[in-house]
Image (tube, grey):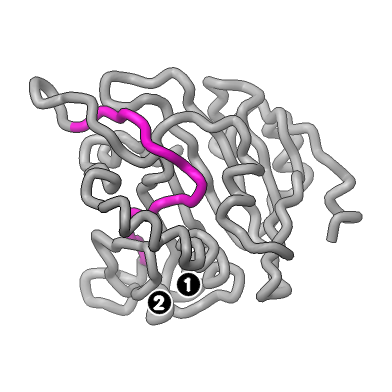
Amino acid sequence: MRPSRTPWIIAFAVVGSALTHAAAASMHAQPSPLRELLLRLAEGAPPSQWRTIPGVRWRTFLPPDAPQGNGRLEWQGQLRLQGFGEVMVPKGVGADNRAVKANEGDARLLVQGDAREGVRTIELVKYHASADYAGVLRRQLRGRDKVVLVADGCATDRYGEGNDPGRTAIYRIDLEATAMPVYAEASRDEAGTRYSPGETMLSFTRKRPSDHHMARMGCSIHKAEDRAR
């Protein structure tokens, strides 16, 4: 089943309200925190190399070998995607719900895996629906990195849910610094609620979805992917 995002929506503290304009400008001069995460995912980096990443604020970071971890790896945090400006977002619940200013690139982060395989997935959710998935991804990368469309127009996401058919796409990301690609599934929720102005969801993994799986999702598969390597 698809994991619920409701606790994230309620618990998420808006990062933008806590960052000064000077800090935001400094962050753009540094490597993208998402790119640093994707490099570690592609290379199968151990937990010790994930703990300190510029621009990533971990809220929970429990190594899988910790007694409480039971071999599971699940870290939650926040980061800011590059290339976005100021927007209004809802904050608080019930009578405390109100609109506040934040950076549209502020995103909540969930990293999952286990002691045997290490990190398997990176899940990212940012406020506001962005249809230009490739543009969002490219703004986090460097000159010779590539974003290659694998499939789009999918009728459902990988969980078989299809409330917004045609809004899911799959990309391959080639990072100049490593020979191993990572794959991104991108989708969006444009409806919005009192507690969310809509969302863009990005899920990253080292494993390419099979053509059979993408066909079951109702995707249009782009064979030109192989020629783009």
**From the viewer's perspective, is 63 left or right of 212?**
left
The residue stretch that appears in magenta? 73-91
The x, y position of residue 46, in whole percent, is 46, 79
Q: Residue at x 48, y 22 (%)?
A: 190
Q: Residues within 10 Å of mark 1 (few under 14, many from 20)?
A: some
What amino acid is labelled 1 in the image?
A: Gly
Label 2 close to label 1 by CB (< 8 Å):
yes
Q: Residue at x 78, y 45 (%)?
A: 211
Which image quarter is the N terminus in?
Answer: top left
Q: Does residue 24 sit above or below 195 in this rendering?
A: below
Q: Does residue 79 sit above or below 175 in this rendering?
A: above
Please identify the quarter of the rendering in which residue 8 is found. Answer: top left
The x, y position of residue 172, in whole percent, is 71, 54
Q: Secondary structure at mark 2?
A: helix
Q: Residues within 10 Å of mark 2 (few under 14, many from 20)?
A: some
Q: Main secondary structure of the magenta part?
A: strand
**From the viewer's perspective, is 104 left or right of 31?**
left
Residue occupied by mark 2 = 47
Q: Nearer the viewer, residue 93 or 89?
A: 89
The tag earlier along the polypeptide, 2 or 1, is: 2
Q: Secondary structure at mark 1?
A: strand
The x, y position of residue 44, in whole percent, is 55, 75
User: Marks 2/1: CA distance?
Assistant: 7 Å
Residue occupied by mark 1 = 118
Q: Residue furthest left?
A: 95
- Comparing labels 2 and 1, the label whose residue is closer to the camera: 2
User: Is 75 colored magenta in this rendering?
Assistant: yes
Which image quarter is the C terminus in?
Answer: bottom right
Q: Does residue 214 sit above or below 70 in this rendering?
A: above
User: Is 209 colored magenta in this rendering?
Assistant: no
What amino acid is labelled 2 in the image?
A: Pro
